[in-house]
């Protein structure tokens, strides 16, 4: 039995990511991806059981590549308010990128085990890091003694409140200055809700 090549798997993910960005997920066929990598459909299906699974792999790779360092930097930060400001701006600007929004739309259409797997390995791990850092600050009496998992999700909700749905449904992404302003407002609301002294 032939061993699946991780290099070939990565080349399939690379080709799919490029095709999804160029044509959109729904409009991209397995045949179009095959044309980019050579071989046959069997080559792709030997690594991915379905197109949905391939979409999930592309999403997860994109999340890991673009978001992981943002969450890790926050998880290692010592200064709560500046760290929140830096994190919020970086997170929101990445989240609203066209390629990520395209894949997010697809994930919402396929809320099956593939979507759940991407969530567990990507966003959930990221927001668990946020909760962990809030817990660290709570133990040092820098942040209130609350359920920090819930607090992290409150921050997530505030960050996505103004722009995420609009961009998801096709409105253009504002310029960087406006996105940063939205992120700053979300942080101010978060700090205000948890009764922290604002700068």
Image: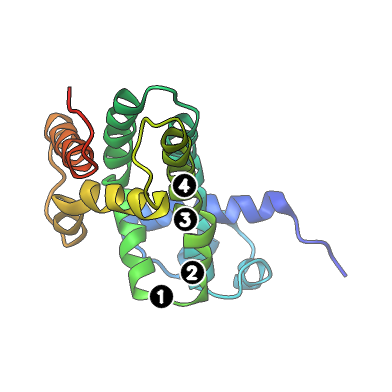
| Separation of residues labelled 3 and 4 (CA atoms) | 5 Å
Q: Which mark is residue 111?
A: 1
**Looking at the picture, does residue 46 appear above or below residue 126?**
below
Front residue of 18 and 88: 88
For residue 59, which quarter of the picture?
bottom left
* Chain-order first, disc 2 or disc 4: 2
The answer to whether residue 120 is left or right of residue 6 is left
Q: Are marks 3 and 4 in contact (CB under 8 Å)?
A: yes
Residue at figure coordinates x 39%, y 32% from the top left: 141
Front residue of 141 and 124: 141
Q: Are marks 2 and 1 in contact (CB under 8 Å)?
A: yes
Q: Nearer the viewer, mark 2 or mark 3?
A: 3
**Looking at the picture, does residue 60 appear above or below residue 93?**
below
Q: Secondary structure at mark 3?
A: helix
User: Which residue in the protein does label 2 denote?
Assistant: 116
Q: Are marks 1 and 3 in contact (CB under 8 Å)?
A: no
The answer to whether residue 108 is left or right of residue 140 is left
* Chain-order first, disc 4 or disc 1: 1
Residue 169 appears in the rendering: yes
| Separation of residues labelled 2 and 3 (CA atoms) | 10 Å
Q: Nearer the viewer, mark 1 or mark 3?
A: 3
Crowd class of label 1 (few under 14; some 14 to 19; many from 20; radius 10 Å): few
| Separation of residues labelled 1 and 3 (CA atoms) | 15 Å
Q: Secondary structure at mark 1?
A: loop
Q: Position of residue 163 (x, y in %)?
A: 15, 50
Residue 26 appears in the rendering: no
Residue at figure coordinates x 34%, y 74% from the top left: 109
Q: Where the N terminus falls, by quadrant?
A: bottom right
User: Which residue in the protein does label 4 denote?
Assistant: 126
**Looking at the picture, does residue 158 appear above or below residue 67?**
below
Crowd class of label 3 (few under 14; some 14 to 19; many from 20; radius 10 Å): some
């Amino acid at each position: 039995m032939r061993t699946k090549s991780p290099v070939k798997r990565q080349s399939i993910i690379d080709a799919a990511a490029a095709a999804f960005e160029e044509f959109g997920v729904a409009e991209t066929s397995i045949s179009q991806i095959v044309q980019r990598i050579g071989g046959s459909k069997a080559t792709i299906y030997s690594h991915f059981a379905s197109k949905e699974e391939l979409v999930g792999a592309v999403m997860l790779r994109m999340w890991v590549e673009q978001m992981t360092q943002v969450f890790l930097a926050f998880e290692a930060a010592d200064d709560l308010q500046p760290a929140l400001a830096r994190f919020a701006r970086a997170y929101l600007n990445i989240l609203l990128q066209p390629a990520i929004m395209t894949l997010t739309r697809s994930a919402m259409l396929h809320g099956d085990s593939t979507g759940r797997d991407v969530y567990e390995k990507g966003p959930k791990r990221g927001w668990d890091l946020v909760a962990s850092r809030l817990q660290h600050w709570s133990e040092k009496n820098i942040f209130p003694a609350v359920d920090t998992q819930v607090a992290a999700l409150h921050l997530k909700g505030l960050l996505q409140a103004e722009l995420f749905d609009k961009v998801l449904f096709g409105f253009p992404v504002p310029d960087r200055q406006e996105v940063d302003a939205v992120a700053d407002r979300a942080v101010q609301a978060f700090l205000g809700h948890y009764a922290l002294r604002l700068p």
